Image (tube, rainbow, N blue to C red):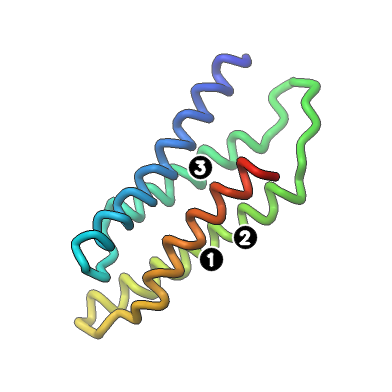
Amino acid sequence: METLRDIVLVIHLVGFATLFGSWLVEVVNRRTQVTRLMHWGLAISLIAGLALSAPWGTDADFNYMKIGIKLVILVIIGALLGILGARQKRGAQIAPALFWAVGILTLANAAIAVIW
């Protein structure tokens, strides 16, 4: 069971890397565009994170406060991606502050996972 949990953890990390990496590519190219890859990274992180937060018959003590905060941040990132994606489809200008917030919140979510 522990091996399966480790595999889900790797999938969760791949989701984070996909979201943050695709955001970073846009920053390096000096674009403020939301890509489909960002949405995929968000979805992978969400699904794998929810799977990791479920007790799998282990004796581990879960920090549900940390899990809840990470979930709220992930929902905010999803809302920002949705807002920016809708503006992008209409051809409207994307606010750079909102675009930067996606990356900062994504990095903050990873920092909470590691430091807390």
The residue tagged 2 is 72
Say left or right for 109 vs 86. Answer: right
The residue tagged 3 is 47
Q: Pointer 3: residues within 10 angstroms few (<14), some, or many (20+)? A: some
Rendered view: 63 above or below 34: above
The residue tagged 1 is 76
Q: Is 114 or 99 nearer to us in this picture?
A: 114
Instruction: Answer with mark 1 or mark 3, whichever residue precedes in sequence.
Output: 3
Relative image position of residue 112 (x, y in whole percent): 63, 49
Relative image position of residue 60 (x, y in whole percent): 77, 26
- Please name the amino acid that badge 1 sits on: Ile
Mark 3: secondary structure:
helix
Identified at 48% across, 56% down, the residue is: 106
Q: Quadrant of the N terminus?
A: top right
Say left or right for 38 vs 1. Answer: left
Q: Quadrant of the C terminus?
A: top right
Mark 1 touches mark 2? (CB < 8 Å): yes
Relative image position of residue 8 (x, y in whole percent): 51, 28
